[in-house]
Image (tube, coloured by chain):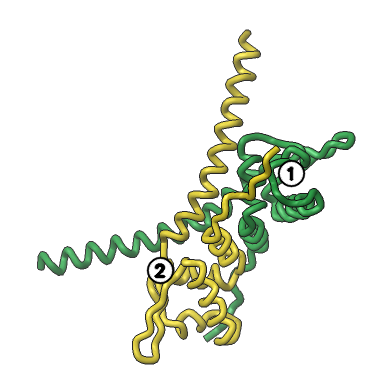
Chain colours: A yellow, B green
Amino acid sequence: MLKSPPAPDSSLDGAFHALADPSRRSILDRLSRGSASVSDLAAPLPISLPAVAQHLHVLEESGLISSVKVGRVRTCTIEPAALRSAERWITKRCEGWERRLDRLGDYLEEKDAG
Amino acid sequence: MLKSPPAPDSSLDGAFHALADPSRRSILDRLSRGSASVSDLAAPLPISLPAVAQHLHVLEESGLISSVKVGRVRTCTIEPAALRSAERWITKRCEGWERRLDRLGDYLEEKDAG
């Protein structure tokens, strides 16, 4: 059997990796309610500012957020396209599985009726 | 300001971590089309059987799959509840952001009209 590597989609790797951390999910949750400065994002988190900056770096690299710096203030914004692409990957697999269960249900009904 | 840690949800940590690897997504993709044995899952992957076993362990720990061993054959099945819970987390944040954009659009329209 010809072995081909899984279709590479490093953007999904990065997005799911970024989502796997509770501080980063907390930042995304805050940003889903509107853009925010780094210090606003850091305020409710029980971690150091450098740790927040590191999380923001991971989020930005993954394409889940973008940021602009004006003067000394960096403002972060959620990027829904990358979130939607991660969501779409999951949705398709759930739907695939559910379609399969439906077909199995149909088969069992037909068998009962037959 | 009172700093509280992000609401812990280690099941989401595990699910997103599991989803961040292309071999594990490839396994989930295959399982979304029906349960499969470990050797069936390993066949198309360009990695060793121990590496596949390790990925299956991560997937099982994260709750995204379950497995049963009958005789010498272990059969894996996707667990859609864990996938749906990861999907739901993302969907909520996208919807939050889109609601916010809608409100901004309404405000700008009212401002133009006023």
Residue, disc 2? A33
Chain letter of mark 2 equals: A
Residue A12's quadrant in the figure?
bottom right
The x, y position of residue A108, in whole percent, is 64, 19
Kind of residue at badge 2: Arg
Say if labels 2 and 1 share a chain. no
The C terminus of chain A - image quarter: top right
Tag count? 2
What's the residue at 65%, 34% (across, down)? B34
> Taking B96 as reference, is B60 left or right?
right
Chain letter of mark 1 equals: B
Dot 2: element: loop
Q: Is residue A3 above or below residue A30?
A: above
Residue B74's quadrant in the figure?
top right
> Taking B114 as reference, is A69 left or right?
right
Kind of residue at badge 1: Ala
